Image (cartoon, grey):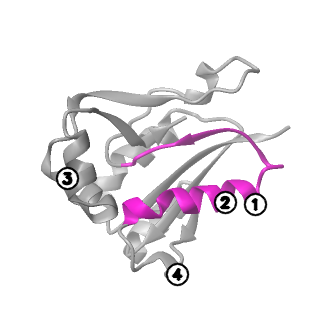
């Protein structure tokens, strides 16, 4: 039987920032699930905490370190999933800064049909955080063309 996969990226965070995500994951009793985190620039203490919770920690590959993390995290996910297609069934990519679990999210999905789920936020793209990464990745013109569009959260995708 294939497992489910909870995947994310953990870069430059101290344990107190990540703790709510991982502690809620641990308390929510996920079954038949691997939690895989790509990690970069985190303390030994934080790495030990992750490993003590059974989190599979993979290093951020150096070939991508020159880019903004927003431009390559999906590449990590793609490579990992493609190399493990025979191992996993459902995949949930979660942003650890703003995701908290109340239950095993994979128990919510009960269909054999393909599904893609994203979070559509109430706010629009015209804020400083979004501006920075969009301009860096695509340029000012693209940013200006989409400032009134609602945000689709790329950090939490099922």
Q: Which residue is mark 2?
A: 80
Which picture quadrant has residue 57?
A: bottom right
In the picture provided, is 131 more to the left or to the right than 11?
left
97 vs 156: above or below: below
Q: Nearer the viewer, residue 95 or 148?
A: 148
Mark 1, other Cα within 10 Å: few <14 / some 14–19 / many ≥20 = few
Residue 20, position in %: x, y?
Answer: 34, 44
Q: Residue at x 28, y 55 (%)?
A: 134
Q: Quadrant of residue 42?
A: bottom left
Q: Which residue range is magenta in the image? A: 69-96
* Mark carried by residue 83: 1
Q: Which residue is mark 4?
A: 63
Q: Tell me whether circle 2 and circle 1 mark residues in contact (CB < 8 Å).
A: yes
Disc 3 marks which residue?
Answer: 131
Mark 3 or mark 4, which is nearer the start of the sequence?
4
Tell me what residue is drawn at x 55 percent, y 28 percent.
105
Circle on res. 95? none
Mark 1 element type? helix
Q: Where residue 46 appears, x then y in whole percent?
A: 40, 67
Residue 87 belongs to the span the image colors magenta: yes
């Amino acid at each position: 039987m294939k497992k489910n996969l909870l995947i994310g990226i953990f870069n430059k965070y101290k344990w107190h920032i990540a703790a709510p995500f991982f502690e809620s994951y641990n308390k929510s009793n996920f079954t038949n699930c691997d939690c895989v985190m790509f990690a970069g620039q985190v303390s030994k203490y934080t790495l030990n905490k992750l490993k003590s919770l059974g989190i599979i920690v993979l290093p951020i590959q150096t070939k991508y370190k020159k880019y903004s993390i927003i431009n390559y995290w999906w590449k990590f996910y793609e490579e990992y999933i493609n190399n493990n297609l025979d191992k996993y069934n459902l995949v949930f990519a979660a942003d650890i800064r703003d995701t908290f679990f109340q239950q095993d999210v994979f128990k919510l999905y009960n269909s054999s049909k393909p599904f893609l789920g994203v979070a559509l936020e109430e706010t629009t793209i015209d804020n400083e955080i979004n501006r920075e990464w969009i301009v860096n990745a695509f340029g000012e013109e693209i940013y200006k063309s989409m400032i009134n569009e609602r945000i689709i959260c790329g950090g939490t995708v099922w």
